[in-house]
Image (cartoon, helix red, strand yellow):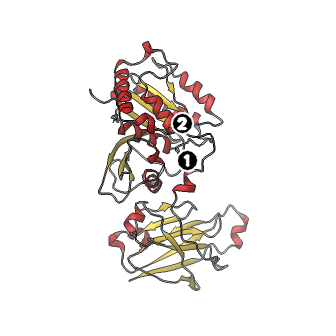
Amino acid sequence: MTPTSVLVVVPTTGGPVVLRSLRSRPGLPASAAFAAGDYRPLPWSGDYARLAAAGGPLSRLADVDAGPYELRLSGSFDAGRSWEVPVCLAHGLVARGYALTTEPEAADLVLWATGAVDLDLAVLPGDYALLDKVARSRDLLATAERADLAVLLPEGPETEEAERAFGALGRARPPVLLPGADVPGALATLLRPVPPAVPTARRHPRMLAGLAVLAAASILAGGAAALRPRPEAERPAVDDAGTASVEPRPAVAPAPASAVVVEELIAPAGSSCRRVAFGAEAPVRRLVPREAQGRLRASRLAPDLCGVAIRPASPGPRIAVGPELTGAALPPTRLPDGAEAYFLRENGRRHLVYAVQAIPDPAKPEADASPAGERLTHALTP
């Protein structure tokens, strides 16, 4: 029997993003996420690598291997963690025989889910802008009218209103509201032949057959026993357990006259810059000290120097980086503390001198008295 075809929707405030493919890629140093047609990992690809790594949250799901995986999406977004729930559910479904589709008209099931997870795949409550995401998904959902619709809404200020909004879509078959406490519980509901509280006569025949076969296969394989229910106790967020440690930095503040902080990004011992750039390892960050007026101490292009991180010393100024660095590095990646990471390309590891400057915000009165306009140079030398 043809596996049930599922359209996985990652709703965002900019519009819905669709999972195009999810497959094992042993050649990658770590799991990575890409936009369709692009070879560059997405800004949040490092978080995905940690989610899918051995011992990471996805290891709590039965039949889901540690990877590495290649995840491709129809588009991307700059920040946020609400992609975690739909991606985890997609891993669970693909591991049990579902086939992803990018065509709404061809889907047997549309999975619309949002939310962040902790280490044990509990869904973290929060304000996920649900009503905005529902409104921006209407057109896509309308094109998948023949498909069953399953929805996961995390606990938050708009949950009840979002449930009513989905109920008011006027679909031939009412949407199935998945339990929003954790990913294993939602996945178990998807694998049942008939989700509770939904009349059998209103289910799609092909969907029923696919779900019944997949549920039986999951039980025979021991999948049901391996889906671990979440204890009632609170879990730490995935950031607490999934983020690799960063070497403690000395408590050296930048010179009073400097409004820019530049740090070297170093591959940890036993790792490589390729793994760091793909997000498999967190880099060690070392402050680049000021050497003279308008100049930072040069950094040596050792094999473990992966790039530099640049941020303003205090909130407010905008950072301008010279083309010498941007041309030799991959597109900048935003780090958790707001710094922009510039990872050097293989062909960009050559002697270069670039300038960096913090541009003051004219809307703030204190900008006139700040040193933010100073231009600093930093050399990368062999």
- Which quadrant does the C terminus fall into? bottom left
Place residue 124 in its image quadrant: top right
**Residue furthest to the bottom:** 292
Under tag 1, what secondary structure?
A: loop
Say whether disc 1 or disc 2 marks the residue closer to the N-terminus.
Answer: 1
What is the residue that sits farthest to the left in this orientation? 1
Quarter that holds the N terminus: top left
| Marking on residue 118 | 1
Task: For marks 1 and 2, give the one nearer the viewer.
Answer: 1
Residue 311 place in picture, x, y as percent: 57, 68
**Disc on res. 298:** none
Assess disc 1: are there few (<14), some (14-19) or many (≥20) residues with their C-alpha within 10 Å of its C-alpha: many
Q: Give the farthest residue toward the right.
A: 365
> Mark 1 and mark 2: span between their CA atoms?
22 Å
Image side of residue 192 versus residue 252, left or right = left
Q: Is residue 146 above or below residue 117?
A: above
> Which amino acid, by three-letter code, is at mark 1?
Asp
Q: Is residue 83 visible?
A: no
297 lies left or right of 224: right
Q: Residue at label 2?
A: 133
**Looking at numbered disc 2 in the image, what kind of residue is underneath it?**
Lys
- Helix or strand or loop: what does disc 2 sit on? helix
Q: Position of residue 167 (x, y in %)?
A: 55, 22
Answer with left or right where residue 137 lies relative to residue 22.
right
Residue 176's x, y, as percent? 49, 25
Question: What residue lies at 42% left-to-right and 60% top-to-bottom?
Answer: 280
Q: Using the image as rendered, state which of residue 224 and residue 322 is in the foreground.
A: 224
Q: Nearer the viewer, residue 42 or 318?
A: 42
